[in-house]
């Protein structure tokens, strides 16, 4: 009989002994964790546990003090943010970082930047290829707006739409880069119940289209409902990792959260 | 480019085209030539400041580099006008990169001051390199431009020359604004960190825009030198850099049309205030303050808002 | 004159003019600390100080001890009016627009000065009569000691003001977090007004003490502003005593360059120092990198 070969899938993102020190503070301590392709993985932990710092390190905004990060097998620690975006990692921000001076549609069009290549001179001289690329950018941007249900806001200034929609816009923009890994930093922050349910659906849809999702989130219901796996951080260290069921019952996790009121946004 | 821009461009070209038929006096034509020259510099500055959100308080230096390269190389070394022109551009690119690369990480005030420092140092160099630039007494005898025997000596010929260049650069600028690069620039202005996260190479873009704006200024410098045929360092001082900045802001920082408007107003205004003599700086200051207080977004936006407001009322 | 005496002379000249840069720089810091605005009309306060003093003491023949405080009060009022009518209405505009407003104000002030006093330079008699003193072979004018003394007094007073008085501490609080400061009961508007008034007053004092030495005309402002700003950045933008040290360093280097190298490059010295600092340590000698990253430029 043929032997069944077990092909171990490679993690799409993997950190190894990752460390970050700010002055005297160890923000992230020897962190090892991995994200498998196609997963929805959540990072939770009390405030100050190092979650956003972790995101900032993965996306190149902050350099790690030690350790490595691998994306699709290749090391990305120390790379600049725009290079990491080009490699296929995209993100949203905890406090919305939209381009307030541009319209909703234009914000998403900027997301297409990595997938296009017309340069300064070419644009200025309107050489052949520019018009075609512009059309392509416009169409794909409109598609993403559609997925997030923001089409009717397309020509409004991004700074003028309500917070819930701004969060959706950030996701649309991040999706426009056609990422393989999407990092969502507190996507439910500041949203009401209905909006949170919608975000949950959207995250599932995103995973359904083949994109791996790594999210930082405080809203426990959302996390428990949509995540395949959860990593728990406290004081920069991994305290637990596993399925929602496993993590829920873990004593160390309960300890970490003891005394912390979990609010719904 | 957008329909609105195309329409505006068309109107502008028509107006400029027929202008010399109605205004024949060399004096008024030369004012409009200066408007055109300033407009070229200011378009570059507008891309840098209005769209990319960077500040330069030293752009007169690039204007001067273009002018002096053209002047010195044609007068002292007998270079052809074209060669001198390209040398000016080349030198401006080099100097722009020298300034842009280290100051890139600086923001707001620091960047402004670094550009100010650069501008002043170039100004001092113009003044001190006596054998080359003629120092404070200036450089004269700059030849006028001629293509194939046809001389552009001023008057309506030079008017068309300058404005043709200006319009071409305007089209180039509008193309950039309405493209991937233009969006990337505005994104950098909106949120640098988000722009980076979306794959925009912010450092490279900032340098590119800065260098581009320096090239615009250098082109203007060449046109200036061959028009006035005599240049001196005082035309390229800090005061002029600040004046250029004001053209962008007062005209309307966020729009290239605003910049053109600003160039027009702040070129024509000082000329028309000549009559005031002792009062001229005072009146100038009063007008500037008034504009800034009532239309801080610039005259262009101010006018548009007024038009919208009036439409609502009636 | 021996080389040593020459250098000593230059150092004293440098300290003298450096004192003015220090006071201008201090003025910059005060406004910057309260508002993060760079007031490019700072030099005009110095100019007004000198010229108004000339008017009061030479034309109206007021004695020094009346003219001095009166001039300072007038210029302080100008600073306050400037804040009320030009800065406050535009408080929501972009930082760039505000910087431009200060530039426009500088033009306006210069216009007023030119209108009133014309383009000629004016002088004041030195505060104490008497010829120059010899120190180590260097010729030092008596007025120099007035300049240095006044600067020292100002430094001490402002340090006490910001460190010890409630108003001073309140002003520092405003720059870090106006919202929090306001919630603590600090009247932010008033603090901003005071910062402009105070800076104007400092500028006036500088103008008064320096005029007997280097005269004063309507157009002095911009150069002083630029160099004073270099002094402030060198010392660390926002750090009071930094501007003082910065001012002296700029003044001395400038003076040495003018004397030993070539006077034409004198004006470039301050700027080269500036560029140098911006390349290597933008937060200045005393500035802290972390802090300068937090503050919004």
Image (cartoon, rainbow, N blue to C red):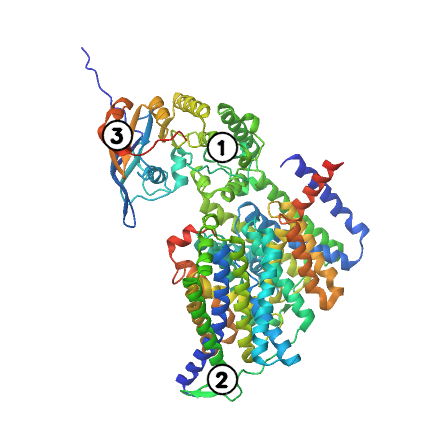
Q: Position of residue B208 (x, y in %)?
A: 50, 48
Q: Which mark is residue A254?
A: 3
Q: Are marks 1 and 3 on the same chain?
A: yes
Residue A244 in the image: above or below residue C2: above
Q: Which mark is residue A115?
A: none
Q: Position of residue B63 (x, y in %)?
A: 59, 58
Residue B99 in the image: above or below residue A194: below
CA distance for labels 1 and 3: 31 Å
Which numbered mark, 3 or 2, is in the foreground of this view?
3
Tell me which residue sits at (67%, 53%) in the image.
B291
Q: Secondary structure at mark 3?
A: helix
Which numbered mark, 1 or 3, is in the foreground of this view?
3
Q: Position of residue C100 (x, y in %)?
A: 59, 56
Give left or right: position of A55 versus A237.
Answer: right
What residue would you read off at disc 1?
A163
* Contact between labelled residues 3 and 1, with CB atoms less than 8 Å apart: no
* Contact between labelled residues 2 and 3, with CB atoms less than 8 Å apart: no
């Amino acid at each position: 009989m043929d032997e069944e070969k077990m092909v171990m899938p490679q993690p799409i993102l993997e950190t190894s002994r990752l460390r970050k020190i700010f002055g005297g503070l160890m923000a992230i301590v020897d962190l090892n964790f991995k994200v498998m392709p196609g997963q929805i993985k959540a990072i939770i932990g009390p405030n100050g546990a190092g979650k956003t710092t972790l995101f900032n390190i993965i996306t190149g905004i902050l350099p790690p003090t030690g350790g490595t990060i691998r994306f699709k097998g290749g090391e990305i620690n120390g790379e600049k943010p725009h290079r990491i975006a080009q490699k296929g990692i995209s993100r949203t921000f905890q406090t919305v970082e939209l381009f307030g001076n541009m319209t909703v549609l234009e914000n998403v069009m900027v997301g297409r930047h990595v997938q296009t290549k017309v340069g300064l001179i070419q644009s200025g001289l309107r050489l052949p290829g520019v018009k075609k690329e512009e059309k392509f950018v416009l169409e794909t941007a409109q598609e993403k707006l559609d997925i997030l249900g923001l089409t009717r806001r397309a020509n409004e200034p991004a700074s003028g739409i309500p917070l819930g929609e701004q969060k959706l816009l950030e996701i649309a923009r991040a999706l426009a880069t056609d990422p393989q890994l999407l990092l969502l930093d507190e996507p439910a922050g500041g949203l009401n119940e209905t909006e949170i349910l919608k975000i949950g659906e959207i995250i599932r849809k995103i995973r359904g289209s083949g994109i791996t999702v790594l999210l930082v989130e405080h809203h426990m219901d959302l996390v428990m409902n949509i995540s395949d796996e959860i990593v728990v951080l406290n004081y920069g260290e991994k305290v637990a990792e596993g399925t929602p069921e496993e993590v829920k019952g873990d004593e160390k996790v309960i300890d970490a959260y003891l005394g912390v009121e979990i609010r719904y946004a | 480019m957008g329909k609105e821009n195309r329409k505006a461009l068309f109107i502008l070209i028509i107006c400029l085209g027929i202008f010399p038929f109605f205004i024949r006096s060399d004096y008024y034509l030369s004012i409009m030539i200066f408007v055109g020259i300033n407009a070229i510099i200011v378009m570059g500055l507008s891309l840098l400041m209005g769209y990319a959100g960077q500040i330069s308080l030293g752009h007169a230096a690039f204007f001067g580099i273009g002018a002096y390269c053209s002047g010195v190389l044609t007068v002292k070394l007998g270079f052809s006008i074209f060669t001198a022109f390209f040398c000016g551009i080349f030198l401006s690119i080099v100097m722009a990169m020298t300034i842009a690369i280290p100051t890139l990480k600086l923001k707001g005030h620091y960047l402004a001051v670094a550009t100010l420092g650069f501008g002043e140092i170039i100004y001092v160099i113009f003044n001190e390199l006596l054998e080359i630039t003629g120092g404070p007494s200036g450089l004269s005898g700059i030849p006028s431009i001629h293509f194939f025997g046809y001389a552009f000596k001023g008057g309506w010929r030079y008017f068309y020359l300058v404005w043709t260049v200006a319009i071409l650069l305007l089209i180039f600028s509008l193309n950039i604004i309405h493209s991937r690069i233009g969006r990337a620039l505005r994104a950098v202005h909106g949120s640098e960190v988000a722009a980076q996260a979306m794959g925009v190479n912010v450092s490279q873009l900032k340098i590119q825009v800065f260098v581009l704006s320096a090239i615009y200024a250098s082109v203007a410098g060449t046109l200036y030198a061959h028009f006035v045929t005599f240049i001196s360092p005082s035309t390229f001082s800090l005061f002029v850099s600040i004046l250029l900045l004001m053209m962008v802001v007062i005209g309307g920082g966020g729009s290239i049309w605003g910049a053109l408007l600003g160039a027009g107003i702040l070129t024509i205004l000082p000329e028309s205030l000549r009559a005031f003599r002792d009062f001229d700086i005072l009146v100038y200051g009063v007008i500037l303050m008034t504009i800034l207080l009532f239309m801080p977004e610039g005259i262009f936006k101010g006018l548009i808002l007024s038009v919208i407001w009036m439409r609502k009322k009636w | 004159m021996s080389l040593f005496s020459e250098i000593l002379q230059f150092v004293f000249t440098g300290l003298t003019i450096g004192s003015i840069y220090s006071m201008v720089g201090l003025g910059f810091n005060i406004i910057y600390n309260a508002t993060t605005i760079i007031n490019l009309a700072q030099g005009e306060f110095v100019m007004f100080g000198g010229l108004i003093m000339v008017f009061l003491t030479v034309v109206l023949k007021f004695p020094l001890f009346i003219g001095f405080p009166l001039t300072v009060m007038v210029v302080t009022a100008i600073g306050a009016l400037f804040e009320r009518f030009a800065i406050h209405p535009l408080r929501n505009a972009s930082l760039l627009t505000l910087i431009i407003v200060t530039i426009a104000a500088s033009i306006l002030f210069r216009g007023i000065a030119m209108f009133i006093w014309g383009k000629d330079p004016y002088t004041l008699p030195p505060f104490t009569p008497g010829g120059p003193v010899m120190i180590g072979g260097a010729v030092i004018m008596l007025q120099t000691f007035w300049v240095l003394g006044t600067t020292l007094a100002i430094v001490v007073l402002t340090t006490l003001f910001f460190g010890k008085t409630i108003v001073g501490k309140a002003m520092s609080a405003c720059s870090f977090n106006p919202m929090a400061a306001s919630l603590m009961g600090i009247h932010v508007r008033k603090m901003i007004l005071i910062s402009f008034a105070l800076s104007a007053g400092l500028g006036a004092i500088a103008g008064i003490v320096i005029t007997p030495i280097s005269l004063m005309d309507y157009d002095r402002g911009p150069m002083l502003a630029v160099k004073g700003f270099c002094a402030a950045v060198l010392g660390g933008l926002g750090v009071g005593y930094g501007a003082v040290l910065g001012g002296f360093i700029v003044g001395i280097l400038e003076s040495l360059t003018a004397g030993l190298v070539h006077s034409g490059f004198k004006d470039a010295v301050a700027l080269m120092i500036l560029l140098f600092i911006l390349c290597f340590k933008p937060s200045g000698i005393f500035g802290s990198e972390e802090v300068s990253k937090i503050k919004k430029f």
